[in-house]
Image (spheres, grey):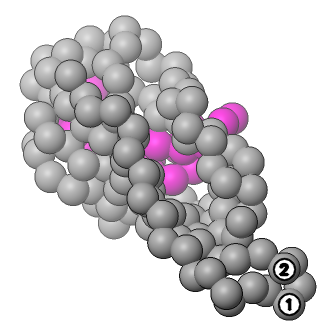
């Protein structure tokens, strides 16, 4: 069973933007990937802060997928399920970044007000345990 969503935030209080009168933040989210019998986009329910921009994204594979014939995961945002990671190979454990995924993805992605999503490569995924690790910069 995947762990619950975790987040940590570093605020830079007192360094308000002259334009927005907001404090800049760097925030990291760790979001579990839940196995479902579907290759459709799955909404994690984790919304990105308004004004958030992507700093880094990775898929931490804790237990590799063995059963599924297509052992990949896409990570994205609402309406674009592979915007962040495209075809990340989950047949082995480890920390997968953009460089490990197949296919080009634009960088950076504007995450402001979107939800993080993922899509499994096969309806027969069984063993995989993974979590999405995303770091964003923004203001609050």
Characterize the local packing of mark 1: few (<14), some (14-19) or many (20 or more) Cα atoms within 10 angstroms.
few
Residue 72 horizontal side relative to residue 38, left or right: left
Does 35 appear above or below 76? above
Q: Position of residue 139 (x, y in %)?
A: 70, 70
Location of residue 111 by image quarter:
bottom right
Residue 136: which quarter of the image? Answer: bottom right
Residue in the image at 70% along x and 77% along y: 23
Furthest residue in direction right, as rendered = 19
- In three-dimensional space, the C-alpha distance between marks 1 and 2, rounded to whole angstroms, equals 6 Å
Residue shown at the point (38%, 45%) measured from the top left: 6
Q: Position of residue 124 (x, y in %)?
A: 26, 12
Estimate how packed mark 2 is, as few (under 14), some (14 to 19) or many (20 or more) residues with alpha carbons within 10 Å: few
Residue tagged 2? 21
Tag 1 residue: 18
The answer to whether 32 appears left or right of 81 in the picture is left
Which mark identifies residue 40?
A: none
Q: Nearer the viewer, residue 41 or 48?
A: 48
Residue 135 is at least partly visible in this image: yes
> Which x, y percent locates residue 94?
15, 52
Q: Is residue 68 magenta?
A: no
Q: Which residues are magenta?
A: 69-91
Q: Is residue 71 visible?
A: no
Contact? badges 1 and 2 (CB < 8 Å): yes
């Amino acid at each position: 069973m995947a762990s619950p969503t975790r987040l940590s935030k570093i605020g830079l209080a007192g360094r308000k933007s002259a334009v927005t009168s907001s404090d800049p933040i760097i925030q990291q989210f760790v979001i579990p990937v839940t196995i479902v019998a579907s290759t459709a986009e799955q909404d994690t329910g984790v919304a990105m802060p308004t004004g958030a921009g992507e700093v880094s994204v990775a898929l931490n594979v804790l237990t590799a997928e063995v059963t599924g014939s297509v052992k990949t995961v896409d990570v994205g945002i609402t309406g674009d399920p592979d915007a962040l990671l495209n075809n990340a190979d989950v047949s082995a454990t480890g920390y997968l970044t953009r460089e490990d995924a197949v296919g080009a993805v634009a960088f950076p992605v504007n995450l402001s007000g979107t939800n993080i999503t993922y899509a499994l490569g096969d309806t027969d995924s069984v063993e995989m345990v993974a979590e999405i690790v995303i770091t964003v910069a923004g203001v609050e």
